[in-house]
Image (tube, helix red, strand yellow):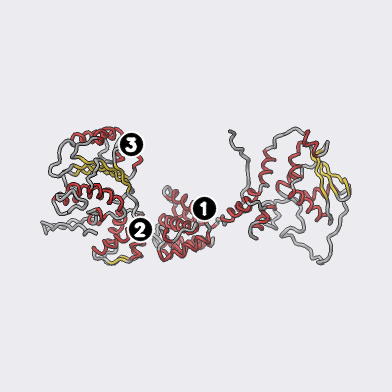
Amino acid sequence: MADPTLQPPDANPGRPKEYVVVARRYRPQVFEDLIGQEHVARALSNAITTHRVGHAYLFTGARGVGKTSAARIFAKALNCETGPAPVPCNHCEICQSISSGDDVDILEIDGASNRGIDEIRQLRQNVNVRPSRARLKIYIIDEVHMLTREAFNALLKTLEEPPEHVKFIFCTTDPNKIPVTILSRCQRYDFAGIETGSIARRLGQIVASEGVEAEPDALEVLARRAAGSMHDGQSLLEQLLSFAPERITLADVHGMLGTAGDERLGELVEHLVARDAAGALADLDGALGQGVDVGLLVEQLFGYLRDCMAAAVGCPAETFLYASPVTRDQVIAAGKRLGLHTILAAMQILDQSLSRLRQSTQSRLIAELAMVRICALEDLDELGALVAELRAGLPPAESGSAPAQKKTADARLGGRPAGDTSARPTPRRADEPGVAQAPQPASAPPPTVALTAANAAELWSRAVAGCSGMLAESAKQGQDVAIIAPNRLVVRFKSEYTFAKSMCERPDSTARLKQVLAELTGQAVGIDFRVIGGDESAAERTAPARPASPRQRLIEITEHPMVRRAHDLFGAEPTRVIDPPKG
């Protein structure tokens, strides 16, 4: 690592020395100093060594990853008095003037403020002028994507065939806005985001040079907050050096940034995992009372759940981006307890909340709403297991835990908990959950009710009332009930209700009706379903095909196993059936 550039002695001791910010004082001076961009440094060094230097280069990447610094180092390597050489001396007059940005042959242009065609026309006129003292005239255009279309067109011919003494280096954070005609004439190098560990090590070197002590955890938090930008990390360190000029602690970092500590964040996540909304809101209130910024806290939770997601899919702890080393075990445990699908749903809630926080003044209310919504999430991994079982051919009744089966039973009672008889005019059976039953001897057989022509219609009505959902709606369409044999009913439907008849003939539907009739009569009762005017097979052959009504289709879809399961888990109710587009 090269020594940082030292400030020259002040010629006027009576005047206060000008302070130079950390990012400028510790700017990389050779290719070796480009942290995280080893591939770029190697390629540019080899280009100089093998005499394969192009006439135009494009450096792309996020802010603060070293694009402009690499351009200056490349310019020094090409124009150094001892070069061209991969390693500039940094001592000759040309190297020092390039480092300070004062060299007359190295022109750094801000593309955002010099974006018009007039500026490019001036550049085209100047390129023919040979350099004053250096070997090459080099144009470094920062944020080149800000140039207008006319400016790019004016630059195109010069860029394709520049004079031998001219080189172009373009830097941009948005290469997609650069015309293809420009891109095709440049050698492109993509600068990657810098790893958190590399930023932390560089910040440690800087604080050591500044004579300041710093806790490793504090520098780790600063590096994570920099999000891959060395310049951002150095700017945060600059601010922190003013906040704590002698010793930097983890509490100082959280206090300056307005973020929550690992312990506070872990407690909040624990309440979310336990679905403890009251505890989550209390922790949120305590964090805000300590000066934590609500927006940053939501961002921290978002990052924390990202690492939980990585743990849930089986990634090792080394892939975590936001969790500190001391909290990795807690992150892994939270990922296992929440489950992947629940984590994804929680992250979607936080993502929506972050978007709303940027546009709302009610930041605390939005954060509280997000906490409560996350605590109200069901165990969504159960839904994935259900889908897998259905694909394997298992009926819903054979899958699910006891709580899920209880929810299913509640849903079959019209979506109300067992024991709730509000808004339910139909009578309930004595064996339903929540209905008080008179004590009976364990060996006493149920009373037997003889099935006669007089009570056949009444028993059928009571059997229909003992069912729910689509089965009850379909069975109500039966127009005529009679006895065709001992303990055997025949239920007839009009021809326009063949759909309802077919729904009653389903094995599970028939079994349910027989079960209720057996409970009412104390004996097994058979059921036949027919169409008025002929037997079932004849009616099905002769009855004209009629499209099902919207209500019939809605009833049918309501009884689908997946829809029923969605109702059990989320309380969802279908409102309409939408046909897929034809063709």
Q: The residue tagged with tag 1: helix, strand or loop?
A: helix
Q: Is residue 376 above or below residue 112?
A: below
> Which residue extends farthest front?
50
**Where does residue 438 sit, x and y in percent of width and height?**
79, 63
Q: Mark 1 points at which residue?
A: 345
Q: Name the residue under label 3.
A: 179
Label 2, residues with CA under 10 Å away: few <14, some 14-19, many ≥20: many
**Which amino acid, mark 3?**
Pro
Q: The residue tagged with tag 2: helix, strand or loop?
A: helix
Out of 139 and 262, give the one closest to the viewer: 139
User: Is residue 567 shown to the viewer in this render?
Assistant: no
Q: Distance between the residues labelled 1 and 3?
A: 39 Å
Q: Mark 2 points at which residue?
A: 196
Count of marks placed on residues: 3
User: Is residue 239 shown to the viewer in this render?
Assistant: yes
**Which amino acid, mark 2?**
Thr
Residue at 43% over, 56% down:
303
| Residue 126 image-quadrant placement | top left
Q: Are marks 2 and 3 in contact (CB under 8 Å)?
A: no
Quadrant of the snapshot with the C terminus: top right
**Which amino acid, mark 1?**
Ala
**Where does residue 400 sit, x and y in percent of width and height?**
64, 57
Q: Is residue 571 left or right of residue 460?
A: left
**Where does residue 101 sit, x and y in percent of width and height?**
19, 48
